[in-house]
Amino acid sequence: MTKAINNYDKTKISMAHVFLQYDQATMIHKYSLEHDSGWLYITFINRIYRINRKTGNVQWSDHNFETVYESDYNETMTIYDVLCYSKDRCHLSHEFVNINSLSSVRTGNLSPNRGFFQNTADFFNGKTVELRNACIALSGKELEKGDVAFKLNLFPFLPIIIRFLEADDEFPASLQILADRNTLDYMHYETLMFALTHLFSRLKEEMRIEKR
């Protein structure tokens, strides 16, 4: 029986066609991408992805593509957005700001009061050793201020800071995300949600590996 295609898969297929309409030489030059005749290569959260230059299909591997996996919706949409829609002269400001200040849409997905961030903070609560080791596994650079604080690379050219505070008698666990002020020159505001969702997924994955 043929597997039904859900809306996420339909969107990925549609965006693959959109990707193919953009100039790949521009992408290669802008981000100094490794490439060959069949693929473009890009590192996203410490993992190498490749984009098929003829189909737009996105895959990842942890072992030089000996074993290949299909990228999921959050991964795929983030990579497409950065490669296709980033501004021509995008560059870092080297000034980090709270992600909620990146947009005037205070009720958007990245509002700190939404359950997404609190649920993630609650998951990390009581697991600071595992979280720290997960950040190290993702090649993060440890920072001060916070029970666990690291600068991590979404992409080699685009860093992000996570700062986690354990719950105490007065306050619940909290998770603060800081991004470069120019992050939206690289991706849409909505896409940052996809990127962060995948970042948290990767951290939880590394924490599960650590627990084993």
Image (cartoon, rainbow, N blue to C red):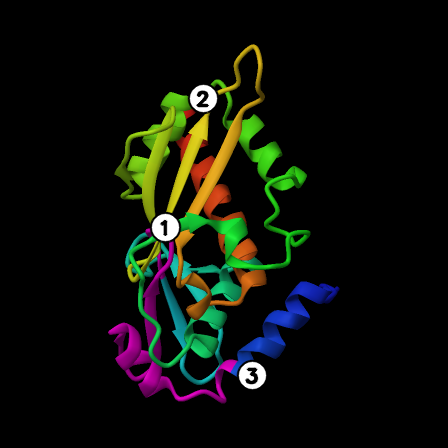
Near-viewer residue (100 or 50): 100
Would you identify the image quadrant in which residue 206 lies?
A: top left
Residue at figure coordinates x 50%, y 34% from the top left: 175
- Identify which residue is drawn at 45% across, 25% down: 165
Give the Cα distance between marks 1 and 3.
34 Å
Q: Position of residue 161 (x, y in %)?
A: 37, 44
In this orientation, does residue 139 appear?
yes
For the residue marked with disc 3, what is the amino acid?
A: His
Q: Residue at x 34, y 75 (%)?
A: 40
The amino acid type of the residue labelled 1 equals Phe
Q: Which residue is mark 2?
A: 127
Q: Amino acid at mark 2?
A: Lys
Instruction: Look at mark 3 in the image and give the residue it sits on.
Output: 17
**How far, Cα to Cα, is label 3 from label 2?**
42 Å
Foreground tag (3 vs 2): 2
**Label located before the other in sequence (3 or 2):** 3
> Does residue 45 sit above or below 204 in this rendering?
below
Q: Which quarter of the image is occupied by the N terminus?
A: bottom right
Q: Is residue 72 visible?
A: no
Tell me where residue 158 sits by quadrant: bottom left
Residue 170 among those drawn in magenta: no
Tell me where residue 156 appears, x and y as whole percent: 29, 59
Counting from the top left corner in percent of width and height, residue 198 is at 50, 50
Give me the C-alpha separation between circle 1 and circle 2: 26 Å
Q: Residue at x 33, y 66 (%)?
A: 42
Position of residue 104 in the picture relative to residue 209 (left or right): right
The residue identified by callout 1 is 96
Secondary structure type for disc 1: strand
Which range is magenta?
19-48
Q: Does the magenta segment cover residue 35?
A: yes
Mark 1 or mark 2: whose residue is earlier in sequence: 1
